[in-house]
Amino acid sequence: MTTTESDAEAPAHVIDLPTAVLVVGAVSAYAKAAAAQEKAAKLILTEHYLPEGARMPILNPVTKAKLGTLTVTEPSPKAEVDDEEAFLDHLESHYPEAVEEVVTGLRRPMTPADVAKLHAVLREHAPDLLRPPERVAADWARNEVLRHAEATNEPVPGVSVHTRRGHVSIRPVAGALDAYRALVASGHVDPLAELPAGTTNGEQQ
């Protein structure tokens, strides 16, 4: 059969919106069910069939062709400190040079006056510890201007407004998976149906 130019340029079949939504819902339901089943099946394998460190091929029972490899990891022990003071006592006894006392903070929250006092002391006695002054916007002003820019899209120097792509979420009702399975079995929906090509910035690829 010869493919004509008009055939080659004919647009690909695109499923209608209700069917596309149904396909996405079915795929989501199957994926969530499969994920739960996969977790349960792996737990059964590790608890009843295979020891840690086991490695087995996955074989097609008809053709005997290899479909993959299943591996059970052998986790290594990991030590964690759950009593810092006891651990430091131990280190101090065995590695005294590894433990030192350092100032990690202040005894109380600092007020703006405290911060100003600390900066004054540092400027006078240790100016090399301070970074050059920099401009900092108050949070309330920053948030107010950004909210206004988002609401009005009016240009603001140094600010750009971006609209993110919508996020699709699926919240199935009780019994949805059984309903999807019935629809698939009856031929009403194909979870592998091809959806239209993806888009970028609103333009079809």
Image (cartoon, rainbow, N blue to C red):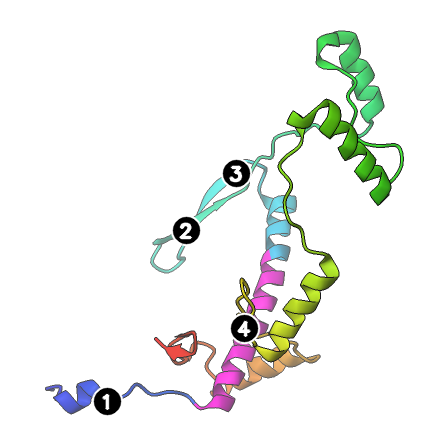
Q: Which segment did they paint magenta?
A: 16-38
Type of the residue with mark 3: Ala
Question: Residue at label 2?
Answer: 68
Marks counted in the figure total 4
Q: In whole angstroms, how far apart are the C-alphas of marks 2 and 1?
A: 39 Å
Write the residue at 48% across / 40% down. Answer: 55
Whichever of labels 2 and 3 marks the residue nearer the N terminus, that label is 3
Q: CA distance from mark 1 to mark 4?
A: 44 Å
Task: Give the mark, 1 or 4, whose residue is nearer the N terminus.
Answer: 1
Q: Main secondary structure of the magenta part?
A: helix
| Crowding at mark 4 (Cα within 10 Å: few <14, some 14-19, many 20+) | few
Mark closer to the observer (2, 4):
4
Q: Say the numbered circle drawn on residue 184.
A: none
Q: CA distance from mark 4 to mark 3?
A: 61 Å
Task: Please name the amino acid that badge 1 sits on.
Answer: Ala
Question: Is residue 71 among the parts visible in the rendering?
Answer: yes
Q: Secondary structure at mark 3?
A: loop
Residue that carries the numbered disc 1 in the rendered image: 10
Secondary structure type for disc 2? strand
Residue 110 in view? no
**Which residue carries the number 3 mark?**
54
Give the label, 3 or 1, closer to the camera. 1
> Which residue is tagged 4?
155
Q: CA distance from mark 2 to mark 4?
A: 55 Å
| Percent of width and height locating residue 58 | 44, 51
User: From the viewer's perspective, is 160 left or right of 82?
Assistant: left
Separation of residues labelled 3 and 1 (CA atoms): 53 Å
